[in-house]
Image (cartoon, helix red, strand yellow):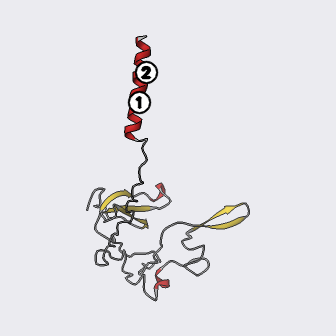
Amino acid sequence: MLSKKIMLGVSGLLAGLLFTTGCARREPAPPTSCVPRIVEPASLQQMRYPTARDWLAGPERSAAFQPTASGRPESALYGSVRTVQLGRRWVASFHEGVDIAPLHRDRLGRPCDTIHAVAEGRVAYLNRLAGQSSYGKYVVLVHASSVGELYTLYAHLAHITPTLQTGQT
């Protein structure tokens, strides 16, 4: 009998809680504002070109980039740096980088431009051995930004300064 009274008491308590906490009709809350926060872009003074080619966005920009198979930077083959064999066919292999043509070459035709960071940052990773990556020798930098951390990758380098170390700013 006591257990029956407890069950009825619990049922009555639940009914009372439901009635007082949510069974009554409520007007819907007005929608909250979901306007995205506007982030100011970095000023051009904070960014710099990675090479002596400072006209990458100018009218003569097509000469600044490595040529593509089609000759058009907007082509599907833009960024193609190698080909792969599929059966008897050779097809272009795409990558998501921008290949900046060297401004200067040595007498053997090898690029010899100095590469600079596009913005202040910290060295996140170094790969000094070309055979350990499809990027060859490369450096990854991390940059502070108003939208979070941004990473830049400097790949296919001929040389990395020996004193450059991970964590260096």
Image quarter hosting the N terminus = top left
Judging depth in this view, the residue of 2 and 93 nearest the camera is 2
Which numbered marker is on residue 14? Answer: 1
Distance (Cα) linking label 2 and label 1: 10 Å
Q: Quadrant of residue 165?
A: bottom left
Instruction: Tell me the crowding category of disc 1: few under 14, some 14 to 19, or many 20 or more residues within 10 angstroms, Cα based.
Output: few
Name the residue type under label 2. Leu
Q: Which element carries disc 1, helix, strand or loop?
A: helix
Q: Residue at x 45, y 76 (%)?
A: 100
Q: Residue at x 39, y 59 (%)?
A: 30
In the figure, is residue 44 to the left or right of 99? left
Residue 128 in percent (x, y) is at: 39, 58
- Residue plotted at (47% across, 72% down): 98
Above/below status of 39 relative to 167: below
Q: Which mark is residue 8?
A: 2
Q: Residues within 10 Å of mark 2 (few under 14, many from 20)?
A: few
Q: Residue drawn 41% across and 80% down?
A: 104
In the image, residue 60 above or below residue 9 = below
What's the amino acid at mark 1? Leu
Q: Residue furthest right?
A: 88
How far across and down, in percent of the image, does residue 107 sit? Answer: 44, 79
Front residue (pair 146, 37) = 37
Residue 85, position as x, y percentages in the image: 67, 62
Element under disc 2: helix
